Image (cartoon, helix red, strand yellow):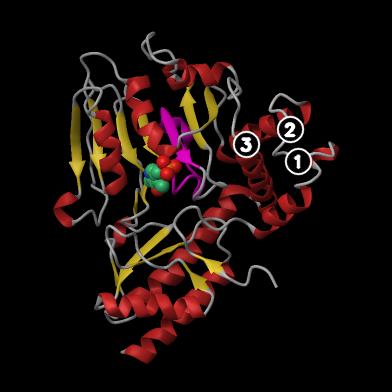
Amino acid sequence: MTHQIYNFYAGPATLPLPVLQRVQKELLNFEGTGMSVLEISHRSKEYDAVHKKASQLLRELMGIPDNYKILWLQGGASTQFFMVPLNLQQTGKPMEYVHTGIWSKKAIKEAKLYGSVNIVASSEDQKFTYIPKNVEFTKNTSFAHITGNETIGGIEWQQWPTVPKEVPLVCDMSSNLMDKVIDVKKFGVIYAGAQKNLGPAGVTVVIVRDDLLTRVPENTPTMLKWKTHADKDSLFNTCPCFSIYFCERVLEHLKTLGGITVMEKQNRKKAKLIYDVIDNSHGFYRGVAQKDSRSLMNITFNLSTPELEASCVEEAKKNGLIGLKGHRDVGGMRASIYNAMPLKGVEKLVEFLKEFKEQHE
Ligand SMILES: *Cc1c(COP(=O)(O)O)cnc(C)c1O
């Protein structure tokens, strides 16, 4: 009788049921050790194999070239908001950011602690309902930073911006890592908290081109240098073993499903089902994001009043559809439909939204 609920929370978020079941089965006896992965050494050969496999699988699935390091760190994506400028800023060269919503704002705030920040484009003029187009970064910048998907606003880059070739493009992909096929070579750094589209909370993935590891000032605390972790394969200190192990199981699962190409196809199908309900509702449901910037992962919409929204969230809950309330800062409703959300969950939501409309028009 487990798991009859479909969970649309933005993060931590739903995880693949077969992986949860496998982890449950393995919990008391990890890889035949007679111990749990939660209680064995991060230096043990059993854990080490899984640790290595997690990076291998991520590399294989995302097509990450050999000259990129994969780091498994703690502190969340929020820690990367300052580790990015700390590790990449070059004296005399400003940092350039695109401002697309609440997450980019937090990243920008931290960067300002380290030096001068230029906002090269912003969608604040229209309440962050779109991704700016034709964004231009200058040559003389330390790095260019974008937020791949604004989890709260529900807008996502559809086409990556071009950057001058000497400028590394840095992307916060916390909520859209592996939602579609991407060309990793376009980026200098990709970072993502795991708890949205990859695994449980507690670990953050940083994918960094190796020539960018040496910019960091000498007097930086050891733990805050990407290079420290790159040199030790993310085993400089005790790593978040359980979270990394869990991510490895998710990645194995993704591979058996056919990898990111298959995920992308399914994600487009899932998102379209919900956006179609919004678009065909004659204004009963109002999409927040402009059509050309719509997120595949976080679908934000409003009803005519906050009361009606609250009742929609409540009714949905009674139907086993949980977590549809929008972020507390923006209100409204939000359906987060990451890779692990089954098509069936989306179909059930769509059916519910249609019925709710009929009953309340
Ligand atoms: C959730 C989220 C973050 C913050 O992640 P933490 O791991 O909680 O620090 C940053 N950026 C984006 C786009 C997010 O969705």
SS category of the residue bearing label 2: loop
Residue 287 figure quarter: bottom left
Is residue 188 rendered magenta in the image?
yes
Nearer the observer: mark 3 or 1; the answer is 1
Q: What is the magenta range? A: 174-193
In the image as oriented, which residue stretches furthest toward the top? Answer: 218
Left or right of 21? Residue 10 is: left
Q: Which residue is mark 3?
A: 60
Residue 242 figure quarter: top right
The residue under the point 24% across, 78% down is 304
The tally of labels here is: 3
Three-letter residue code for mark 1? Ser
Mark 1, other Cα within 10 Å: few <14 / some 14–19 / many ≥20: some
The residue under the point 55% across, 70% down is 345
Q: Position of residue 253 (x, y in %)?
A: 68, 50
Image quadrant, ligand 1: top left
Left or right of 177? Residue 156 is: left
Do the numbered discs 1 and 2 sit on residues whose CB atoms are within 8 Å? yes
Q: Position of residue 223 (x, y in %)?
A: 47, 20
Q: Report whether residue 162 is seen.
A: no
Mark 3, other Cα within 10 Å: few <14 / some 14–19 / many ≥20: some
Which label sits on residue 40? Answer: 2
Left or right of 137? Residue 51 is: right
Q: Position of residue 7 (x, y in %)?
A: 52, 65
SS category of the residue bearing label 3: helix
Q: Which residue is mark 1?
A: 36
Label located before the other in sequence (3 or 2): 2
